[in-house]
Image (tube, rainbow, N blue to C red):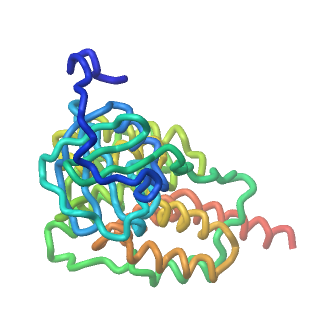
Amino acid sequence: MPGCSQRGPTPRYSHTRYSHNRGSDRITLIGKHAQQVLKAGSGHVIALFNHSFYLSTAEQRLCCVGTSELVGGPINIRTSQRQLPPIALNARWHCEGQCLYVGSNIALDYSDGLIFQPPQRLNTETIALPDVSTLTLLKVSPAAKIGNLESKVEQRLQAGAEAIEQWLPSPSQPLPDAVVQLLGCGEGLTPSGDDILVGVMAALYQLNYDQKLSLLARCIHTYAHTHTNQISQAHLLASCEGMAVEPLQQFITAIFSGDIASVETATESLHHYGHRSGRDAMRGVMAVVNSLIVPRQTTTSAERIQER
């Protein structure tokens, strides 16, 4: 297990204090990155929220544990609990016998938890390009509504999104500084600039633009630790591998489904993800669509006209 040699012998814990009925409280869905956190064996609780909390390892790898309402995602652990019991910040957690113990009153069996799967990748040569109705809907979606451009933060976000659109068709060019400046830009648990980048990388992964994803991921690995907070870093690093939360994956898939009703449903779902994380992630996806997909649609339409 990573880092075990640095911690010395694994401590033994008494479980008598837990009133745990194995199978009643359990982990139902776990992401790939969250699995790696549990394999580390132990750590502490570093953040608490109404319906979730974050675990950290000694190596500062993070995962998010939440109620049955938590969406599937690479760093997320969904439990069967509708409400989380009281837990203290900095409480210790450890894993033993396929069970996650947190503090003195949480014990979660993960022996039969499902593994959150990465999205099905789309073949850019054969996918249905988004039609006019889909593109029109996306243009009036919450993601398309730019905030107050007099705000320096919004100006920075807009400059970063535009820089991505200009860079993606020719990634051999150096990554614009405006893209790097997206990291940590904005307020909240995951700043808006980080969410835009997550949307970009999720779209590049699902659309099989691996080289472009790799170049952007290299930038994230270089600068994220100095530009943004620890929790947002965890989401960004997962997105470097193309991994994203379920509503974002579904949104990208819906755009190329040819079904306007699916696009409407997926847009609404992502819009309500987080305080504004979903909307900002949409902006990232649309940067990819506008720079790499819309030009192909225009070319295809022109070719059809010539054929006639």
Name the quadrant of the C terminus.
Answer: bottom right
Q: Residue at horizontal 43%, vertical 38%?
A: 98
Q: Position of residue 265 (x, y in %)?
A: 55, 80
Instruction: Judge from the rendering whether residue 235 lies leftward or rightward of residue 213; answer left or right.
Output: left
Whether 281 is drawn above or below 125: the answer is below
Q: Is residue 224 visible?
A: no
Looking at the picture, tell me which residue is in the foreground, 15 or 153.
Answer: 15
Q: Residue at horizontal 50%, vertical 43%?
A: 111
> What count of labels does the image hold?
0
Instruction: Judge from the rendering whether residue 248 lies leftward or rightward of residue 131; answer left or right.
Output: left
Looking at the picture, tell me which residue is in the foreground, 50 or 187.
Answer: 50
Q: Residue furthest front?
A: 16
Q: Residue at horizontal 68%, vertical 63%?
A: 299
Whether 44 is drawn above or below 297: the answer is above
Q: Is residue 46 visible?
A: yes
Q: Residue at horizontal 13%, vertical 54%?
A: 88
Q: Position of residue 59 (x, y in %)?
A: 23, 30
Looking at the picture, tell me which residue is in the foreground, 146 or 236.
Answer: 236
Q: Position of residue 188 (x, y in %)?
A: 19, 64
Whether 255 is drawn above or below 23: the answer is below
Name the quadrant of the N terminus.
Answer: top left
Instruction: Judge from the rendering whether residue 210 lies leftward or rightward of residue 164; answer left or right.
Output: right
Q: Residue furthest right?
A: 308
Q: Position of residue 179 (x, y in %)?
A: 30, 51
